Image: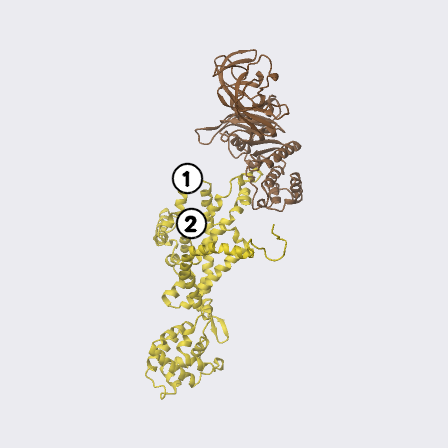
Chain colours: A yellow, B brown
Amino acid sequence: MTDISHSGPVLAADGTPLKRSLARALRMQKLRALMLIAPLLLFILVTFILPVADMLFRSVENRIVQDTLPQTVEALADWDPASGQLPNEAVFAAMAADLQVAAEQKTHTKVAKRLNYENPGLSSVFRKSGRKVKKWDLATDGPFREKLIGIDDGWGDIELWRTIKTYSGTFTSGYFLNAVDMQLGAEGPEIRPENERIYNTMLVRTMRMSLIITFSCIVLGYPVAWILANLPARKANLLLILVLLPFWTSLLVRTSAWKILLQQQGVINDTLVWIGLVDDANRLVLINNELGTIIAMTHILLPFMILPMYSVMQTINPSYLRAAKSLGATDWTAFWRVYFPQTVPGIGAGSILVFILAVGYYITPALVGGTKGTFISNLIAYHISTSGNWGLGAALGAILLAVVLLLYWVYDKVVGIDNVKLG
Amino acid sequence: MADASNVDAFVEFERVQKSYDGENLVVKDLNLTMPKGEFLTMLGPSGSGKTTCLMMLAGFETATHGDIRLDGTSINNIPPHKRGIGMVFQNYALFPHMTIAENLSFPLEVRKMGKSEREEKVKRALDMVEMGAFGGRRPAQLSGGQQQRIALARALVFEPELVLMDEPLGALDKQLREKMQFEITHLAHRLGITVVYVTHDQTEALTMSDRVAVFDDGRIQQIAPPDQLYESPENSFVAQFIGENNTLEGTVKEINNGIALVQLDDGELIDCKPVNVSQPGERTRVSIRPERVEYNKDRLQAGVHTLKAEVLEFIYMGDIFRTRLRVAGNDEFIIKTRNAPDQVRLQPGQQIEIGWLPEDCRALDA
């Protein structure tokens, strides 16, 4: 018998510590398992994790001003915007030198575009000047202060210089401030004027409508899931196919179908007018507004609510309801006190799925949302593909991601993520 | 057997029929009367209609035809929650999202009972099943036997007069099952409640019940106290289903003075008690319990017919010996003998003669 009462690590038969011996025995298995999932890991890394990380980085990255206008940035270091005075001649000279180089490399338009996000109008100042500054002789053509202001009196605006100075760092909070309708003013972050605010409204609208859509899915999906779970297997399968049918149809086709149904000269309005419920002059506005988005997205996301609820309900033994009734509970009490609490994990899983999908939805709101029913993702798409302001798009995306994670955390605290059953 | 209809009937089934598909009857013409305080077991193979009967009594199935009465009132149209019948389910059906105390409190809450009264009753019910310390736990934290006790306590906590149990011990291991059988019967008798108990385990039925109703093919084949059921089965299904049984096939030759002379298929003659044969020439199945067969010539009554038998197998089972014989062409003829100091241990190949009292050998339907 080996003596195992001594202190210190437990030893294997050959005298090596048992832990090391075990690790060695399992190493081969672990390696093999890792090799099996390596292709997937690599795929996810390249196509998902790296792009997401890159986009998140873009939301704070701001090298362009420094890189394009290095001398100006340096010269501006001594200038105090609060003084109310324009920068001195040295700064103007540096700007002229930077512009000359930038115009040669055609990068002055890019920095102009970047600064234009923060101070609309700057773009044209830079473009106009770039062309002319190219011909100047830096050694002899001074003073540049008057010459630049001569080209465009934008150079005489103290705000222009303040913007350049504010956004000359390597990193910036500008995109994020922009994404929550704020800007970097003379005294630090400040709220934008009322007529320039949009993103907060959009974020709140996205959240509110996603909640409405999630709730509609619960209300509409719960009875369907219940019927599915209580039908005999063959009929349930048939019904399940009907539930899944939308998945086999293109999203665009389904959304376009809603356009046909909901528009003012559409099927629903025509029917209502024909029945006489709605006057021909006052046809209902069912599309190109919030209502249209909610209707179409509830329809599209409904299966994501039904399936988890169904799989949870399937596991609930009917004897629970019988037991409750035999104990004296009415049908309603038995349902509400005994059946419903057991379905909460399914509702939770479905709600998380539907809500997260809804918050990031893009095609349907774009097609049926009009201007009142679009989501923040439509704005993100606009910034990524149309306006080219990737930094702002990235910042909006990052905020959306943070909000979803926050909600997920709240859900975990309130309901408990362990209670979520997807099947 | 006491004629049940004379007693104050508490539960009554009158000409009850049940069909699920409109083509086949699951329960065919069921008539049953139970007095108050009786422990009745419905025993039968699966698909015999016993659970359907229980569900009709509980109100979860409606009778296709006939009348079910509880304490003189027809309950056909009373919904389950108004019947006031306690029920223990096969899988216990303890509500997983509630604690044990909340489970027990549930029937009292839906009866709008005050908080202090509820707490007191829950405590008493838990103490009754010796689970007083477990009120704060969840069902999943209890063992099968403990869950079973809680299910019992929950069915009893609102003091129903009738309690239904649907194979409540089916999921327990043998030892625990035997212990719970004992506890349930004791509890039922102590509280004076009427119990309808469904099982397919005949030992359970025999040990627990005041009366057993044997179901087959949608009918009650026999309803009797356990000893009568075992010793005097009225037909060959009951004889086969309850306990171990030896069967020999033959034809009735004559019936005289309550003794039937049966000619077995290999020509041998034996004396039997006619149970449901009435005239010579009828085919019959003769049933003999293994422990009633005697092979010690000194103990056989003079003048009885004996049969030749060959020992095929001797199995030592501790308290008893089990011997397999070939008798009248039947290779599965079993006899059981007590392991007593003077008992002979038969050897395979040995030729013996066996016999029995005519009243232990029952001529039943073929």
The N terminus of chain B: image quadrant:
top right
Amino acid type shown at disc 1: Arg
The answer to whether residue B130 of the structure is visible from this angle is yes
On the image, the x and y values in percent for residue B132 come to: 66, 43
The residue singled out by tag 2 in the image is: A303
Quadrant housing residue A289: bottom left
**To which residue does mark 1 refer?**
A234
- Asked whether A149 or B365 is in front, the reply is B365
Relative to A18, B23 lies left or right: left
Q: Nearer the viewer, residue A131 or B95?
A: B95
Q: Is residue A367 above or below residue A383?
A: above
Real-space CA distance between mark 2 and mark 1, rounded to the nearest whole angstrom: 19 Å
| Residue A107 relative to residue A403: left or right | left
Vertical placement of residue A71 versus B100, above or below: below
Query: Which amino acid type is shown beneath numbered disc 2?
Result: Pro
Q: Where residue A258 sits: x, y (%)?
A: 37, 52
Image depth: mark 2 or mark 1 in front: 1
Q: Is residue B229 left or right of residue A150?
A: right
